[in-house]
Image (cartoon, rainbow, N blue to C red):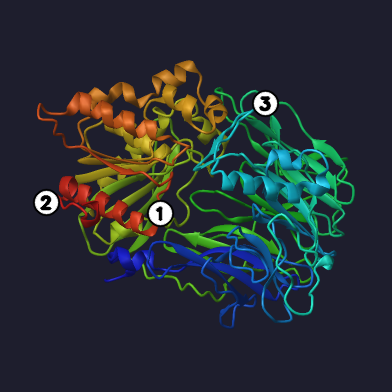
C-alpha cells in the first residue's frame, strides 16, 4: 500500500493541527494548522474555523507569510492571535504582536506594538474586555517607573541593535532553556483593556518604535522586575478581569520552585497563595464563576524517589485548601473546570493512552470519561453551553479536533488536515518483568505476514509514555519500509502509578533496561517477527537507553542514539536544568548508571545524532560519545562502523523540514545497511 509515509517529501507536506480554542457560546472551534511553505524549508500556521457540532466544513480565517499562533477568544467572540505579519501603520518590524479578528467580520488589526513583541495570550476574562499577555522587556527598562517601561525598552533595544550588541550579563541561574538563551530581556505579564482599542478614521499616523500609538490600548505591567521567575508562567483571569492568578517561580540555590500568587489587575498588588519549600504548585485553573482555584501540588523529587502529583482546590483567596482525588494515582497534564463548576476535567497518561477524567470537587471518586485507545489534550469548555472540545491522537492518527459529551461520547469535528492513511496497524503487547511488574507497549505492524525486521524504539522523558502521535519521531515511516516497531513503556514511564515510576528512579540502567529486554524477548518470539534482523533506537532519555543497550548487549545489529546522555557527571553540570537531574540521581546512582563506562563493551554499530543548539542535552554529550567510540573502536586507518550525524543549527528535536528528511534518510540508510544487509547509501544532501 502506498501512503504518504512511503515518501518523505509527501510526509513533511502533510498539514498538521497543533492548537485549538472554543468560542464563548460553544458554537465555533478555532484551530491552528501548520502547512509546508512554498520552498519546503519551514512551516506556516494559519487559523481555521470549524463548527463545534461535528458537521459543516472548515473555513480559513487567516493567511500571511509570517503565520499565526497563540489563539484565544474574547468574551464577545472576537479571535485573538499572535503574528509577526506586517502592520500597515507601524514602522518596519517583524516582532510578533497581538492581533484581533472581529467576530462580526472585517480584517484583523493589531492590538499591541511592543518593540520586543508579544509572547502569547496568557488568559482572557469571560465577563470583561481584559486580556493578559506575556512580553519580554529589558531589565533596565522595567526598573523604576513601570509606566515608562514600554518606551524605555524600545529605546534600549534600538541601542543594542544599532551597536550590534548581543552580550548577556547573568546574575542568576538558569541561563538557557531547551534551545535558546535566557536574557537579556525578562518575561513579564501585561494587562490589556480591549475597550481602549480605538479605530481612527483613516490611517493611523506611523510612529517610531519608542513611541506607543495612542489608538492602541496601553499595556499595564502587572509583574515589574520579575527576573527569571516568569520563564514558565501559567495563569488565569477571574471573570471580571480584576484578579490574575499566576504560577510563578521562586528562586532557589539551583533553579526554582513553583508557587501560586494572585495579582490585583488595577493596582498590581501581589498576594502569595501557596508557596512551600520543596514543593511545586503548578497548573492553576479557575472555576467559571471565579470563586474556586484548582492546581497540582507536588513534593519535589529526591534521589530516594518521585512523589505523587496531587490535585488540590481552594477558594480564590487561598482559604479552604484541600486535596481531592486522594485515591487517584495518575499525573494530570492539564486541568479545566467543567461547565457547572462541580468538577475538574483532566487528562493524564494511563496504560498507553491519555483519557479524559472527571474529578468531583466534593471528594467523590474520579470518573474516566473516555474509554478508548486515544490520547486527549487541550481541553476547552464553554460555560455557557457546556460544550467540551479537545484534540486527540494515537499512533494510528495525528492530532484532530473532537467534541466530548458528558457521557463520554466522542464526535470528530471537521478538520482542514484530513487524517492520513497509515501503512500499519497497532497491536497491544505485554509481558511480565522479573519482579512481577506488567510491562506493556504498542507494536506497529506493517502489511504482510512477515517475518518483519524489528525495531525497538525507546521513548524520551523519561517521565513519558508512548501514547500519541509524533511528527518528529514517527514509527509509521519505519513501517512503510517493512519494519515492525515496538513502542514499549518500561520503568519510569507514566500512566502506571507511582511505584512503576520509582522502579527506575536513581537506577536508569536497571529496571528500565531489563523491562526493555523482557518485552523485546516477548515480541521477537512471535512468528511474524524476524529475531535475526533487529535494531534499537531512542532520543533524549531514549538515547541514554540506546547507549546503555549498546554497552550491555550485542543482540541488535544497529543502534541509533539521538540527543543522548552519555557521561552523566559531565551532563549534570552542562544541561540547562541541572537541579532536576540532581533530584533523580545521588552520587552512587549517577556512577552506577553512567553509560560511558561501558564503551569498550559496545559491539553494535552506532549512529550518533546531535544538534548543536540542544541545551537540554548539550552537544558535548554527542562529541564525547563520538570521541570515546573512536578511541575504543577505530581501526588503525581511523575507520569504524559508527557514524555521527551532526546538525550545527538544530536543537533537541531537529525541526526544519529538510533536516528531518536528512535525519530519516540517514537513519534508514544506516539501519538498511546493518539490519537489512543493504548497501550503504549516503543521503544526497550530505554531499
| Quarter of the image where one finds residue 296 | top right
Residue plotted at (34% across, 34% down): 622
Q: Secondary structure at mark 3?
A: loop
Q: Secondary structure at mark 1?
A: loop
* Number of other residues with Cα within 10 Å of mark 1, as a class: few under 14, some 14 to 19, many 20 or more: some
Q: Position of residue 125 (x, y in %)?
A: 80, 60
Pick whichever of labels 1 and 3 is earlier in the sequence.
3
Q: Which residue position is annotated with label 1? A: 472
Q: Nearer the viewer, mark 3 or mark 2?
A: 3
| Quarter of the image where one finds residue 317 | top right
Pick whichever of labels 2 and 1 is earlier in the sequence.
1
Q: Is residue 312 left or right of residue 120?
A: right
Q: Which residue position is annotated with label 3? A: 252
Q: Secondary structure at mark 2?
A: loop
Q: Is residue 428 left or right of residue 630?
A: right
Residue plotted at (24% across, 51% down): 686
Q: Is residue 494 left or right of residue 335?
A: left
Q: Is residue 224 above or below residue 420?
A: above
Q: CA distance from mark 2 to mark 1?
A: 26 Å
- Outermost residue, top side: 588
Q: Is residue 218 above or below residue 597?
A: below
* Number of other residues with Cα within 10 Å of mark 3, as a class: few under 14, some 14 to 19, many 20 or more: few
* Number of other residues with Cα within 10 Å of mark 2, as a class: few under 14, some 14 to 19, many 20 or more: few
Q: Residue 679, labelled with which disc?
A: 2
Q: Which quadrant: the N terminus?
A: bottom left
Camera-side residue of 443 and 534: 534
Q: Nearer the viewer, mark 1 or mark 3?
A: 3
Amino acid at each position: 500500500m502506498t501512503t504518504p509515509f512511503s515518501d518523505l517529501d509527501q510526509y513533511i507536506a502533510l498539514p498538521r493541527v497543533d492548537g485549538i480554542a472554543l468560542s464563548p457560546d460553544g458554537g465555533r472551534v478555532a484551530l491552528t494548522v501548520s502547512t509546508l511553505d512554498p520552498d519546503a524549508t519551514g512551516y506556516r500556521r494559519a487559523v481555521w474555523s470549524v463548527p463545534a457540532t461535528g458537521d459543516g466544513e472548515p473555513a480559513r480565517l487567516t493567511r500571511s507569510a509570517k503565520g499565526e499562533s497563540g489563539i484565544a477568544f474574547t468574551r464577545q467572540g472576537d479571535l485573538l492571535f499572535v503574528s509577526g505579519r506586517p502592520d500597515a501603520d507601524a514602522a518596519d518590524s517583524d516582532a510578533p504582536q497581538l492581533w484581533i479578528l472581529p467576530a462580526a467580520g472585517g480584517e484583523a488589526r493589531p492590538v499591541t506594538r511592543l518593540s520586543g513583541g508579544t509572547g502569547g495570550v496568557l488568559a482572557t476574562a469571560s465577563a470583561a474586555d481584559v486580556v493578559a499577555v506575556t512580553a519580554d522587556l529589558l531589565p533596565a527598562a522595567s526598573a523604576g517607573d513601570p509606566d515608562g517601561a514600554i518606551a524605555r525598552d524600545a529605546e534600549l533595544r534600538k541601542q543594542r541593535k544599532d551597536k550590534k550588541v548581543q552580550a548577556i550579563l547573568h546574575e542568576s541561574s538558569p541561563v538557557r532553556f531547551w534551545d535558546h538563551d535566557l536574557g537579556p530581556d525578562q518575561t513579564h505579564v501585561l494587562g490589556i483593556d480591549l475597550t481602549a482599542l480605538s479605530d481612527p478614521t483613516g490611517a493611523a499616523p506611523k510612529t517610531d518604535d519608542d513611541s506607543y500609538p495612542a489608538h492602541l490600548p496601553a499595556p499595564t505591567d502587572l509583574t515589574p522586575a520579575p527576573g527569571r521567575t516568569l520563564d514558565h508562567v501559567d495563569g488565569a483571569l477571574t471573570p471580571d478581569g480584576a484578579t490574575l492568578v499566576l504560577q510563578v517561580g521562586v528562586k532557589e540555590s539551583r533553579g526554582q520552585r513553583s508557587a501560586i500568587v494572585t495579582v490585583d489587575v488595577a493596582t498590581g498588588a501581589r498576594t502569595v497563595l501557596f508557596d512551600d519549600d520543596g514543593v511545586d504548585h503548578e497548573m492553576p485553573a479557575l472555576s467559571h464563576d471565579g470563586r474556586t482555584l484548582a492546581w497540582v501540588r507536588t513534593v519535589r523529587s529526591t534521589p530516594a524517589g518521585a512523589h505523587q502529583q496531587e490535585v488540590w482546590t481552594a477558594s480564590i483567596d487561598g482559604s479552604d485548601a484541600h486535596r481531592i482525588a486522594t485515591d487517584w494515582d495518575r499525573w494530570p497534564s492539564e486541568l479545566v473546570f467543567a461547565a457547572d463548576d462541580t468538577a475538574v476535567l483532566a487528562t493524564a497518561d494511563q496504560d498507553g493512552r491519555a483519557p479524559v477524567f472527571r474529578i468531583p470537587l466534593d471528594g467523590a471518586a474520579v470518573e474516566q470519561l473516555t474509554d478508548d485507545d486515544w490520547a486527549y489534550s487541550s481541553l476547552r469548555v464553554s460555560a455557557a453551553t457546556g460544550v467540551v472540545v479537545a484534540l486527540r491522537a494515537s499512533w494510528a492518527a495525528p492530532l484532530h479536533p473532537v467534541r466530548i459529551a458528558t457521557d463520554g461520547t466522542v464526535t470528530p469535528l471537521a478538520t482542514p488536515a484530513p487524517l492520513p492513511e497509515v501503512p500499519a496497524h497497532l497491536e497491544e503487547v505485554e509481558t511480565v518483568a522479573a519482579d512481577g511488574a506488567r510491562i506493556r507497549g504498542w507494536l506497529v505492524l506493517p502489511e504482510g505476514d512477515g517475518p518483519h525486521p524489528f525495531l525497538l524504539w525507546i521513548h524520551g522523558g523519561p517521565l513519558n509514555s508512548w501514547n500519541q502521535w509524533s511528527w518528529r519521531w514517527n514509527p509509521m515511516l519505519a513501517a512503510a519500509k517493512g519494519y515492525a516497531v515496538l513502542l514499549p513503556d518500561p520503568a519510569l514511564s507514566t500512566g502506571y502509578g507511582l511505584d512503576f515510576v520509582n522502579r527506575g528512579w536513581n537506577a536508569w540502567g536497571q529496571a528500565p533496561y531489563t523491562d526493555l529486554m523482557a518485552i523485546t524477548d516477548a515480541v521477537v518470539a512471535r512468528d511474524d517477527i524476524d529475531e535475526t534482523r533487529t535494531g534499537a533506537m531512542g532520543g533524549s532519555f531514549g538515547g541514554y537507553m540506546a547507549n546503555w543497550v549498546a554497552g550491555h548487549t550485542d543482540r541488535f545489529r544497529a543502534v541509533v542514539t539521538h540527543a543522548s546522555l552519555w557521561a552523566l557527571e559531565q551532563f549534570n553540570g552542562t544541561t540547562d536544568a541541572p537541579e532536576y537531574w540532581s533530584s533523580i540521581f545521588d552520587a552512587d546512582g549517577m556512577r552506577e548508571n553512567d553509560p560511558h563506562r561501558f564503551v569498550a563493551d559496545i559491539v553494535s554499530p552506532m549512529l550518533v545524532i546531535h544538534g548543536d543548539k540542544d541545551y537540554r542535552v548539550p552537544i558535548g554529550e554527542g562529541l564525547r560519545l563520538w570521541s570515546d567510540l573512536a578511541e575504543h573502536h577505530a581501526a588503525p586507518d581511523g575507520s569504524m562502523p559508527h557514524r555521527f550525524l551532526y546538525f550545527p543549527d538544530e536543537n533537541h528535536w531537529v525541526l526544519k523540514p529538510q533536516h528531518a528528511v536528512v535525519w530519516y534518510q540517514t537513519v534508514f540508510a544506516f539501519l538498511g545497511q546493518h539490519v537489512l544487509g543493504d548497501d550503504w547509501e549516503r543521503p544526497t544532501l550530505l554531499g
